[in-house]
Amino acid sequence: MIIGGGPAGNTAATYAARLGAHVTLIERDVIGGAAHLWDCIPSKTMIATGGAMSFTKRIQGMGLEQQEAEVDIAALEGRIDDIQGRLQRNTIRLLESQGVRMLMGSARFVSAHHVEVTTSSGVEVLEVDAVLVATGSRPRIPEWCQPDGERILTTRECYPPKVFPTSITVIGSGVTGVEFVHMFSSFGSNVTLVVSRQQVLPSKDPEVAAVLEDDFLRRGVRLLKGARATSVERHGDEVVVSCDDGRVVRSSHAVLAIGSVPNTDELGLDTAGVQVDRGYVTINRHCQSNVAHIYAAGDVSGKMPLTSVASMQGRKVAEHVMGLQKVAHRHLDYDKAASAIFTEPEIADVGLAEAEAFAEGRKIRVTKVPFSANPKALINNDSRGFVKILSDPATGVVLGGSIVGRHAAELISVIALAVTANLKVSDIVESLLVHPALSEALAEAAE
């Protein structure tokens, strides 16, 4: 049984079914995953539209007359719904083709081997050999803020908002927060970002964060560094955000982007004897909980909250349940997972980070090439950012890398492959790449 039909759940379901398992999948919200179809896909769709608007403001530098684009909220909402619908239908068709039994409802453990499933047809108790908990997460809402869905928003209420804000305060400067800053500023909103630390993206390379901060400032984004929000209140058509250092921000809207919480509180995990830590299921390298036949994957596992990681976890769970770990089976290495932030410019990284290496006293070779030296970047009239590659100075093996710039999320795949396969910088240098192309900067950075 799989509880949750998001990327982890549906991947595990289809792969286990192909291996011969009888699979039942329980989903209470939407097949395809609420976090995926209600958060990730809509946000990236809006970011793409905002990016197109930003591009129209740069076309003068490409020999074209300046154009002004306007947002059609109804058309944008229709576009989001269409993409969500297509992805969901594709997922359902795939599950059906593999013979997966799908039940729309909620599930809770009544014992370690029995799960109670509540659907519109009634209540059914199913006996299971193995269970994957992949119930995802939801936006975290602190006690000092009560979203109303109109002016005070959670991330899930912004795709798109009922009215595009004239001004908005974004609370949270992590990945989600900076994506919202980029998105709303692209649509013409006056944006203030509350930054609790002294840089945006506090867990990222300071050099990477600096490029993004410079872009925000050029856009007119107001950065409140070293400020932690303590209250959010609505007064008519105005939202007032108060910070712990006494600063106050007034805007037409505010959005909370301060993380998420796992959806495990109603699953009866304690009845099954499953250990959790702050709501996250504690897992080993096989994604097993302390109860050997109960697994966890995706956001509830407490690992990297990425769709790519969740999907791979789902596949590894299916392999382990069906006994494939006894033959060729590669364990998932979270340290080699590539990630991206869809701001403008895009940010992507993989493997060892420069600051992490220095903190550990590890010897590394760091090479960097700016896109300002890349012909394709100049042709695109967008030379922001750089490629940075970290390697072992003794062996030349690629240890990690960061990319800031256009299409960084696509380009990082080359470095990710090198990190996963233990390739050397010489393997990248000696690859015959396309010219002119942004990827040429990868080979130059590997020199």
Image (cartoon, rainbow, N blue to C red):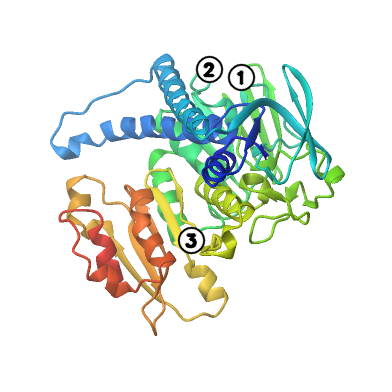
**Which residue lies at the image location 39% right of the left edge and 39% below the top edge?**
219
Residue 325 can be seen in this image? yes
Q: From mark 3 to mark 2, how far is it between C-alphas?
A: 36 Å
| Rendered-image quadrant of the N terminus | top right
Residue 418: where, in percent of width, then height? Answer: 37, 66
Image disc number at residue 150 = 1
**Which residue lies at the image location 65% right of the left edge and 29% below the top edge?**
240
Residue depth check, mark 3 versus mark 2: number of the one nearer the observer: 2
* Amino acid type at image mark 1: Glu
Furthest residue to the left?
A: 63
The residue where tag 3 is placed is 206
Q: Earlier in the sequence, mark 3 or mark 2?
A: 2
| Rendered-image quadrant of the C terminus | bottom left
Furthest residue to the top?
A: 74
Image disc number at residue 162 = 2
* Amino acid type at image mark 2: Lys
